Image: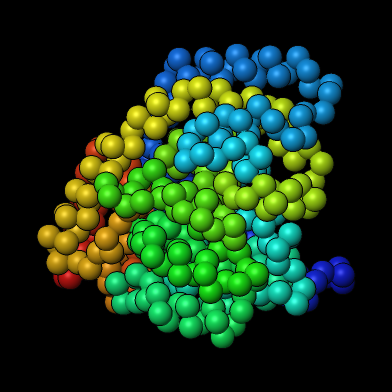
Amino acid sequence: MRPATSLPLREELRGIEPYGAPQLDVSVQLNVNENPYPPSRAVVDDIAQAVAEAAGRLNRYPDREFVALREGLAAYLGHGVGPEQVWAANGSNEVMLHLLQAFGGPGRTALSFAPTYSMYPEYARDTHTAWEVGHRDEDFGLDVDRAVALVRERRPHVVLLPSPNNPTGTALPPAAITALCAVLDGGLLVVDEAYAEFRRAGTPSALELLPAHPNLVVTRTMSKAFALAGARLGYLAASAEVCDALRVVRLPYHLSATTQAVAQAALRHADELLGAVDLLREERDHTVDWLRDQGLRVADSDANFVLFGTFGDPHAVWQGLLDHGVLIREIGPQGWLRVSVGTPAEMAAFREALTAVTKEMSR
Ligand code: PMP
């Protein structure tokens, strides 16, 4: 920590550490829900070609409206979503910031239900939006009646709900989304589907509900199932009016020409990039079963990570795993830990390390 200075820093930012999971050079990295499979040579070559073409025009600003990319994302999403209903930015983090810049702000409130994605309160802070949290059930599901009652009482302008939820992996039933859209008179419901492609069979996407609810926003990202975290491309589907509002608050040319080129090339290879999703879902289910066989509590997961516990000293377990070369995430309710789903070899290393650590700790 640097010594306090006389900088005119906003009071609420004093002493705050920047957000971020540790980026450590460890052989098995299962801490930030990345897709462990890098793009193939053919995809890399096509992305490189697209970037080379964009590079030849880097003296010019990129298409501010990223029309071609919007068309590609709309086609990928399906569900009758048109390009004018799509917005994109540098990661869904930035998409969410745009939403709060346009629909939050001083005198306004954003609400979520804990445990929830740990970045939301930071977007609220940075946009001067008041932040409120309700609570999920014991099993991390949402009690719809209680949630509706809280929204009725607090009248938030924006409700942020990840589905599947991070850090628990829990997906929202469509009835919950419908009920919250109905009670949010004049407010927006943002369903953050960063992990949607990993959901179990029979779990619907909130995209199906878009036509019926003009105050519903569904956010997605290329960082997870698409295996493109390094490209920084997040997007959403909503009404054209919502997208037009976001055009007002974004920085000019916020999506660089190279980002647009990379994302469009990735969309051309969507099938291949998403090819590991089934494998990851199988590995996730296997991880859930194995952890339960060890006598641990494990949240049902529709995502590419698993929340498990409970431990009296979760930090000691996290550190023990790290000492065995396996990096997971200390996050979530007290006593729980989260592991991202990696390759079969990485998950074998995780199981071996956890077995060793729990044995060492019980001595
Ligand atoms: N939403 C949720 C629920 C997440 O877990 C994450 C990333 N961990 C994001 C949004 C942001 O992802 P990105 O900015 O890479 O799209």
Which percent across, then down, holds residue 150? 51, 82
In this rendering, is residue 201 above or below 13? above
Which percent across, then down, holds residue 318? 35, 61
In this rendering, is residue 58 above or below 311? above
Residue drawn where x is 44% and y is 49% of the image? 208
In depth, the one of 75 and 225 nearer the eye is 75
Residue drawn where x is 33% and y is 37% of the image? 277
Residue 79 shows in the view: yes
Residue drawn where x is 40% and y is 56% of the image? 164
Query: Where's the N terminus, which quadrant?
Result: bottom right
**In the image: residue 188, left or right of residue 105:** left
Quadrant of the image occupied by residue 170: bottom left
**In the image: residue 206, left or right of residue 336:** right
Quadrant of the image occupied by residue 337: bottom left
**In the image: residue 51, left or right of residue 332:** right
In depth, the one of 179 and 52 nearer the eye is 179
Looking at this rendering, what residue extends furthest in the left direction?
293
**In the image: residue 58, left or right of residue 294:** right
Looking at this rendering, what residue extends furthest in the bottom direction?
153
Which percent across, then down, holds residue 120? 58, 64
Residue 118 shows in the view: no
Quadrant of the image occupied by residue 235: top right
Query: Where's the C terminus, which quadrant?
Result: bottom left
Residue drawn where x is 63% and y is 68% of the image? 187
Which percent across, then down, holds residue 349? 25, 45
